[in-house]
Structures are given as structure tokens and as C-alpha cells.
Amino acid sequence: MTKQKNNTSWQKTRKFFNDVHLWAGLISGIVLLVVCLTGTIYVYNTEIREWNASHLYKVDHSEGMSKLSPDELLDKNRDLIKGDITGVKISSDEDRSFQVTAREKGDKSRFGTTYFVNPYTGELLGNSKEENAAATFMGYMFSLHRWLLLDKIEAPIFEGLENRKLGSYITGACTILFTIGVLTGLVIWVPRKAKNWRQGLKIKFNSNWKRINHDLHNSLAFYSAIILFLMGVTGPFFSFPWYREALQKSLGTYKERSVRAPGPSAGEGKKGADKDQVKIEMLPLEDYLYSVDQTLDYVGEYTVSLPKDGASKINISKKRAGFFAPAASDKLVLDVASAKVIETDIIKEKPFNERVSGSIKALHLGDVYGSFSKLLYFISCLIATSLPVTGTLIWINKMKKPKKKNKRKTATV
């Protein structure tokens, strides 16, 4: 009697989760199809952009050729680079170009312009403002993924609400439904008896198309469930401030934004700064890189943020190289005058919750452990794209079943 009650309660619970899973999928299905498809492509955003403009990123060199120093490369191209040089990127790859970031006055772009230089000859290869079909295409993929292209529509659809925000709210809400779908799907997947677990892990390709479709939906979703959950739970972080705050609080890393006290006017501040400002001569960049290597003793890529005139600190980040290398960078602050390390921000020394909180974007995009995690995310995102299709087909097939039974009963009568 107790066993029968347990079975009945489990059936009711399973039915509840099944209904939630069904409606979460049906409501968000079309949007998720678009979001997951564009997400699949966007996993390899960097690789696609670089493939299309390989002449900027890849360099040819003869064996035995040595690279010029960063300062020599800057001196050779200083007249060709427009604007103030704000940073450089130095790769450990022998076939990669040396990158210089500069910003002109009035440039409102987020990163300015990147100039690409041959590290062996000092030749300027081009810049990021050049026409690039892949960059344009990936820009549309990103817009479709984040805002459903609503940011391309100038006239507001709803008065008082930006189209970009509207698109972000829609994709964010559908991603929350997707996460609910992943969690409820796992509950539904769990078999009643342990001996049936193997069946849930297999795809019976020798069966009919309905069975194959059912197995593709259940088995593939199970295998990719962890990554699907990570993609889903981090997605709304970029759509809703309340979600971002809640996620940070749950990780114990939330910090309230401090309100800045009103300072002196722009003119007064500038005059005061100029009066007290003492220009500090920079050392050769190689001295700073050498100092970084003493703290971070591994092969990797450097990103140097050059200090403004009068600044006493220089920021340098270093990222490991390799197929399975962590994508997160270690960051150091050095004294401009002496090249001594005065501040460190090393990933492996941080508590786990801080590492997770600082890697939300990487966890969403798959840029966690280099090419290895990107491949896993690409496959998982491809599976996620198929789930609205296979799930809808399962629902349609179930809707047809009662009709067939009724026809048989009528025929018998």
C-alpha cells in the first residue's frame, strides 16, 4: 500500500515537472532557437574574425629571425599610428603579430583602434578599422543573440523603453525559462528503476524516427546538461540588474556602488593636476615584462595598459598559452619608475566564489579553458539549438496519440 502511494506521489511530481518543462519550452522555443544558433556560431567569434583577416594576425618569418623589442616596434610606427597609444598586446606565439591600441580625440568606440605590426620587421600590417566581412557578420550575430536585432530599429517599439533593452529583456526571460527547462528535464529524465538508466543514455538509431527524435532530445540534453545549465544561469546576468545583483549576492561577491562626492569643476581639476603633476620617465617595456615574469613564471600573452603622462603605475596582465590553458588573466600593477610589482591579482590565489564571480562572461561564452572548453561549448550549444525542435516534435507526437485511440474505439463499436 505504501509502495503504491509512493508511486502515485512520484507520478504526480513527475507530471508537474513535465508540465513546467513543456510550457517553458513552448513559450521560449522560437527565441531560444535563434539565441542558441547564434550562440553556437559566436563561440568561435575570435577565430572567425581572425580567419577572415589572417593577414593582420599571422606573420611569416624565416627560421632564426629574432623579434624586435616592443619599444623598437613602437618607435618604427609612431608616425603611422593615429591618436594616443594606450596599450600593446604581445603574444608568445612566434607567428602572431604585435598589437598596438590607440585612441584618437573624439573616438567614442569602446576599445579604440588596434594596429597590427610584424614583430620581426616592424612593418605595419593594417588596423582594426579596415573592412572585414566576418567582423560585420559576427556583429549581426551578437546583436541577434543579445537583442534579437531590435537595436537596429531606430524608432522605439514601446514608448519609454529602448529597443535594445526590450530585446535584452526578451532574451533574458527566455534564457531563464531555458534554465528551468534544463533543471526540470533532469528530474523527468531520472528513471524509476536503476536498471533503466542505460536506456536513457543510449540513442536507438535502428528504431523509428519518433524514437530516435525522443532519444536525441533526452540523451543529448543529459550529456550536455552541466554546460547548458552554466550557459543558462549566466545569460540573464547581462539582461537584468536585479538578476546580476542576486547572482553576486548568492556568490558572496556583491558590492554596493559608492556614490561619488561632487568634486571641483573640470577646469579647476585640470589646473590643479597640471601644477602638481611630475612627469615620470618610463623604462623600456622589456624591463616591465621581465619584472612580470619574475612573479608569473609561465609562457603567456601580455596585455600592457600604458600609463598616462604623470601616472606612477603601469598595469600589465598575463594569460597562459595552450589548448587547455585558463582564459582568465593574472593582473599586476608595477611602479613606472622602478618596474617593481606593487599590486597582484592572481586568479589561483582567489577564493573559489570570487573566481566564479569574475568569470561570468567566460562561463557564458565558453572561454574558460582555452580551445578545449570552446569545443565543448560549441557542441553543447549545437545540442541546445536542436532541443526546441526535437522537444516540439515530441509534444506534437504525444498530442496525436489520443486521437488514434479514439478512432480505434469508434471502429470497434
Image: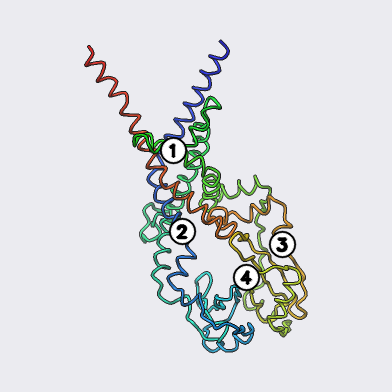
Whole-angstrom CA distance, mark 2 to mark 4, is: 23 Å
Q: Is residue 355 above or below residue 71?
A: above
Mark 1 or mark 3, which is nearer the start of the sequence?
Answer: 1
Mark 1 or mark 4, which is nearer the start of the sequence?
Answer: 1
- Viewer-closest of 137 and 51: 51
Q: What element carries label 1?
A: loop
Mark 2 or mark 1, which is nearer the start of the sequence?
Answer: 2
> Circle 3 sits on which residue?
346
Label placed on residue 42: 2
Whole-angstrom CA distance, mark 1 to mark 2, is: 28 Å
Q: Farthest residue toward the top?
A: 1
> Circle 1 sits on which residue?
203
* Residue 317, position as x, y percentages in the image: 66, 69
Residue type highlighted by circle 4: Glu
Mark 2 vs 3: CB contact within 8 A: no
Numbered-mark total: 4
Residue type highlighted by circle 2: Tyr
